[in-house]
Image (spheres, rainbow, N blue to C red):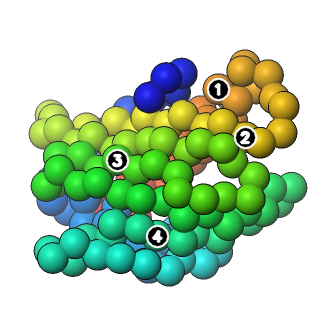
Amino acid sequence: MAEHTRSSIVIAATPAEVMAVIADFEAYPLWTGEVKEVEVLGRTDAGRATEVRLVLDAGAIRDEHVLAYTWDGDREVSWTLVKSQMLRALDGSYALAPAQGGTEVTYQLAVDVKIPMLGMIKRKAEKVIIDRALAGLKKRVEG
């Protein structure tokens, strides 16, 4: 990933418990807020998604995109953009590591939009997306 934004949070659960929530794409509309519709287009032999279509609605921004996922057990999941109406790139990852009090989850994200946008504004948007996603993930896992 070239320019990216990264943030971490500790969740009071095992890496397997956290990754189970991350991998449950069908439940995303219940807890992510912006994700309104999910369709898993392909799965690994182990049942984890390899390609997912997501419909997002974040008020002023509405988009549908397809992401391709790569899994490294319960340690990391990364994704890249396959297609989108508004985005040129959407590359990210969740890295999980045992930590004092649970699991440290590090979310890394790089977004490139098809419309011209200052890099500083893109990084700010990435930070908002990451912080909201980590808070939602923590609440979902611990709740």
Vertically, is 105 above or below 47?
above
At mark 3, the secondary structure is: strand
Q: Quadrant where the N terminus lies?
A: top left
> Between disc 3 and disc 1, whose residue precedes?
3
The alpha-carbon separation of the residues under discs 2 and 1 comes to 12 Å
Q: Residue 105 carries which label?
A: none
Q: Quadrant where the C terminus lies?
A: bottom left
The alpha-carbon separation of the residues under discs 4 and 1 comes to 24 Å
In contact (CB < 8 Å): disc 2 and disc 1 = no
> Between disc 2 and disc 1, whose residue precedes?
2
The alpha-carbon separation of the residues under discs 3 and 2 comes to 19 Å
Residue type for callout 3: Ser
At mark 4, the secondary structure is: strand
* Identity of the residue drawn at 52% across and 27% down: 5
Q: Which mark is residue 113?
A: 2
> Between disc 4 and disc 2, whose residue precedes?
4
Residue type for callout 1: Arg
Locate residue 35 relative to residue 60 in the image: left or right: left
Q: Could you tell me residue 36's position as x and y percent? A: 64, 74
> Between disc 4 and disc 3, whose residue precedes?
4
Say which residue label 4 marks: 52
Dot 4 crowding, Cα within 10 Å, few <14, some 14–19, many 20+: many
> Between disc 3 and disc 2, whose residue precedes?
3
* Identity of the residue drawn at 65% across and 26% down: 123
Dot 3 crowding, Cα within 10 Å, few <14, some 14–19, many 20+: some
Q: Residue 78 carries which label?
A: 3
The alpha-carbon separation of the residues under discs 4 and 2 comes to 19 Å
The alpha-carbon separation of the residues under discs 3 and 1 comes to 19 Å
Say which residue label 1 marks: 123
Vertically, is 102 above or below 58?
above
> Between disc 4 and disc 1, whose residue precedes?
4
